[in-house]
Image: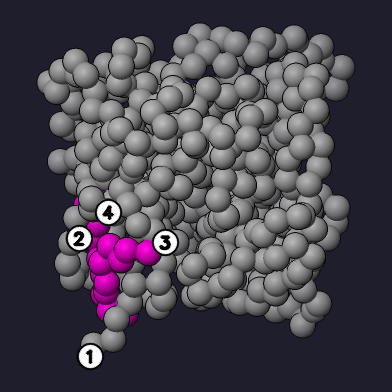
């Protein structure tokens, strides 16, 4: 690895391939405690979940090369289980009920023990029902080095969409045909609006504001959007130094909301997506779909000041954010509402280029995956099925599989494959040398093709990360089979 490659690899959280991993002595499992907590949102109390690490902070931070030895204790009054989103554990330790591991009953513990080979910005969350909507999630940061090499400071931001309502009641309302559900085939939609190039801009701009009867960007009307549990009524203020470099590790832990990251007056560089380094992309506005992560490097202006960083969900005027402030700077009062935000598209995805490369091997075969549903009854599906136990396809260890996902619905779907990372290789008809990811957004009436290596035997969930879609049928599995 030459100096230039080392510098690029250091730009973001990714396995530094070719470098020796650190050695760690055997240790007791790190304790993660799942419990309930009371959060104040817009002056009202709300009971939500939380995951507390051994240092008393949310989630877990560890070193690359450190064995993943964790004990989860369930201090709630209901079953739960934690999925290690971004890691690729062996089958049975992924943290998904029905897939090799039972849920953790109240008062019980569960140990996890596996080699961790994925550095970067990851997260952990419940994979039971709609607990994710109740904030049962936390950061999972795997650092390459003890001290940042390229940044003076790092800060993690976790995003949520929030409702005071019981999520089960919302789902029942959606399935009963009520609510703001917009999954029906889009009445009055002009199919000439579809951008065949795959960038998504033409179609999605056409959908914005088309509320009548069928097409909206969101299923749910939320009461608030949170950045590190806070609204813009009382945002988190992050102290920074004049002229310093800050790395934001941003996690979209929302249950059902794609967002834009708006840096405002400060230009940044996107340096990693889903924990994988990309060649830096400069800008001040970046998309982050549900369950995706984005690492952004910012240069704080030498003259100092207060600099809001906003997170703007698509299709609404509501927003949340944090404020970066140097010593003595006056922090401005920020409104919870702004301009209507446009839909996420794939225009930037088209330009991402990975630092790490897959080995040069041919694709053994291509599987088709149709994203369907959203009609009466709020039933979603994959390949016409709405059964999470239904295998979508099987594969043999060592194969390289391409999956072409066609979204035949009126809503975008952030698609997540467990147990593997994949490479985005085509957006519509555009073949690209795309990013390595574990979640990719598939806009309405468009297609996205991914490629992954079958190198982790087991039965793995493949689903939409919009939790209401996932719990209404848009979840299946892929499995391994022997040569026999």
Q: Are marks 2 and 1 in contact (CB under 8 Å)?
A: no
- Sequence-wise, the earlier of marks 2 and 4 is 2
- Sequence-wise, the earlier of marks 4 and 3 is 4
Instruction: Say which residue appears at 67% left-offset and 28% top-offset.
Output: 164
Residue 64 counted in the magenta span: no
Q: Is residue 391 above or below residue 471?
A: below
Q: Nearer the viewer, mark 4 or mark 3?
A: 4
The residue indicated by pointer 1 is: 484
Observer able to see residue 195: yes
Q: CA distance from mark 1 to mark 4?
A: 27 Å
Residue 199 spot, x, y in % from top left: 26, 31
Q: Is residue 144 left or right of residue 12?
A: right
The residue indicated by pointer 2 is: 367
Q: CA distance from mark 2 to mark 3?
A: 16 Å
Name the dominant secondary structure of the magenta segment.
strand
- Sequence-wise, the earlier of marks 2 and 1 is 2
Instruction: Say which residue appears at 80% left-offset and 58% top-offset.
Output: 75
- Magenta residues span 389-405
Residue 401 counted in the magenta span: yes
Instruction: Say which residue appears at 48% left-offset and 69% top-offset.
Output: 99
Residue 439 spot, x, y in % from top left: 42, 49
- Sequence-wise, the earlier of marks 1 and 4 is 4
Instruction: Say which residue appears at 48% left-offset and 53% top-offset.
Output: 276
Q: Is residue 107 left or right of residue 277?
A: right
The residue indicated by pointer 4 is: 385
Q: Which mark is residue 461?
A: 3
Mark 3 lies on a secondary structure that is: strand
Pick the residue in front: 468 or 90: 468
Observer able to see residue 349: no
- Sequence-wise, the earlier of marks 1 and 3 is 3
Mark 2 lies on a secondary structure that is: strand
Mark 4 lies on a secondary structure that is: loop
């Amino acid at each position: 690895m030459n100096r230039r490659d080392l510098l690029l690899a250091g730009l973001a959280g990714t396995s530094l391939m070719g470098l020796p991993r650190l050695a760690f002595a055997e240790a007791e499992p790190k304790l993660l405690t799942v419990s309930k907590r009371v959060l104040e949102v817009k002056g009202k109390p709300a009971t939500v979940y939380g995951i507390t690490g051994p240092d008393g902070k949310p989630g877990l931070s560890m070193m690359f090369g450190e064995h993943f030895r964790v004990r989860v204790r369930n201090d709630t009054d209901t079953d739960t289980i934690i999925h290690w989103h971004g890691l690729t554990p062996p089958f049975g330790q992924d943290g998904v009920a029905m897939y090799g591991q039972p849920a953790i009953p109240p008062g019980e513990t569960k140990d996890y023990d596996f080699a961790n080979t994925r550095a970067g910005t990851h997260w952990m969350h419940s994979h039971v029902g709609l607990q994710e909507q109740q904030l049962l999630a936390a950061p999972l940061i795997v650092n390459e080095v003890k001290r940042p090499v390229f940044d003076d400071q790092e800060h993690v931001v976790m995003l949520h969409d929030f409702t005071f309502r019981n999520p089960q009641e919302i789902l029942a309302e959606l399935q009963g045909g009520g609510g703001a559900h917009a999954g029906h085939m889009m009445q009055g939609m002009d199919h000439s609006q579809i951008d065949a190039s795959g960038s998504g801009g033409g179609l999605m701009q056409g959908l914005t504001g088309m509320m009548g009867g069928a097409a909206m960007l969101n299923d749910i009307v939320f009461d608030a959007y949170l950045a590190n549990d806070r609204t813009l009524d009382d945002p988190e203020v992050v102290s920074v130094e004049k002229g310093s470099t800050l790395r934001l590790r941003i996690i979209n832990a929302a249950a059902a909301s794609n967002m834009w990251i708006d840096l405002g007056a400060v230009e940044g560089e996107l340096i990693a997506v889903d924990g994988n380094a990309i060649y830096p992309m400069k800008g001040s506005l970046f998309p982050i779909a549900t369950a995706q992560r984005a690492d952004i490097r910012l240069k704080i202006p030498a003259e100092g000041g207060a600099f809001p960083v906003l997170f703007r969900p698509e299709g609404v005027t509501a927003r949340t954010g944090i404020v970066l402030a140097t010593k003595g700077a006056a922090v401005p009062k920020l409104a919870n509402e702004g301009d209507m935000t446009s839909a996420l598209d794939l225009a930037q995805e088209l330009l991402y280029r990975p630092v790490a490369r897959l080995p040069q091997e041919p694709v053994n075969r291509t599987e088709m995956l149709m994203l369907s549903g959203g009609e009466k009854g709020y039933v979603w599906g994959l390949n016409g099925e709405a059964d999470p136990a239904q295998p979508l396809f099987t594969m043999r260890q060592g194969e390289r599989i391409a999956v072409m996902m066609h979204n035949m619905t009126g809503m975008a779907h952030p698609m997540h494959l467990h147990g593997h990372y994949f490479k985005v290789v085509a957006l519509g008809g555009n073949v690209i040398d795309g990013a390595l990811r574990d979640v990719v957004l598939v806009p309405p009436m468009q297609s996205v093709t991914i490629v992954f290596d079958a190198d982790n035997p087991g039965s793995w969930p493949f689903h939409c990360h919009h939790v209401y879609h996932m719990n209404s049928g848009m979840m299946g599995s892929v499995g391994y089979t022997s040569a026999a």
